[in-house]
Image (cartoon, helix red, strand yellow):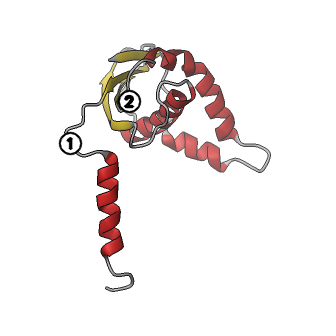
Amino acid sequence: MKTTKIPVLLPGLNKMIASAKQGTKKRQPYAATKRVLSREIAPFVRKLRGVTPPVHVHFTYFVCHRRHDLDNLDAGARKIILDVMVDTGVIPKDNMMIVKKLSATFCTCKKGEEGIEIFVTTYQSPGETAKDIWDNTSNIYLEQPIGVM
């Protein structure tokens, strides 16, 4: 198991979407924000190297108050962190074949101690692979008649 702590909270999904909506052809504030955040957290994420895929990634969020929208906070941070994990070589890709399980815990802390702790472990498969599940699911959809109510 590898672990690291990012000493800041990343923007939530609502802020990321609002930033993306402000973009024009030549000006993309979301892309610029993501690029800056990626550079800032990359040194922390690099410490997770050495875990053999497939992996289970667990996020523990430390927040100083309970007013945060938890799913919003989690979704925004996960996107950026998983992309940085790929960019820094921690994992080859962030698809279902590599990342088998994602989980999160939320804790309160003192002001100034906010952050995100990331735990990465090799995932031990209980049986089916993601490819098996996908193949079975796609077969179910393909076997259903189209346009019949």
Residue 12 location (% of width, % of height): 49, 37
Residue 97 location (% of width, % of height): 39, 41
Q: What residue type is labelled 2?
A: Pro
Disc 2: CA contacts within 10 A as few (<14), some (14-19) or many (>=20): some
Q: Which SS class for mark 1?
A: loop
Task: Reply above or below: 112 against 130.
Answer: above
Which label is found at residue 53? 2
Image-based side of 105 in relation to 116, left or right? left
Q: How many marks?
A: 2
Disc 1: CA contacts within 10 A as few (<14), some (14-19) or many (>=20): few
Query: Residue at 31% across / 74% down in the picture?
Result: 143
Residue 110 location (% of width, % of height): 37, 14
Image-based side of 131 in relation to 92, left or right? left
According to the picture, the residue beneath numbered tag 1 turns out to be 127
Residue 83 location (% of width, % of height): 53, 34
Where is the N terminus found, in terms of image quarters?
top left
Considering only order in the chain, which callout, 1 or 2, is on the residue closer to the N terminus? 2
Q: Residue reaching furthest bottom?
A: 148
Q: Which SS class for mark 2?
A: loop
Where is the C terminus found, in terms of image quarters?
bottom left
Q: What residue type is labelled 1?
A: Gly
Q: Are marks 2 and 1 in contact (CB under 8 Å)?
A: no
Query: Residue at 65% across / 26% down in the picture?
Result: 36
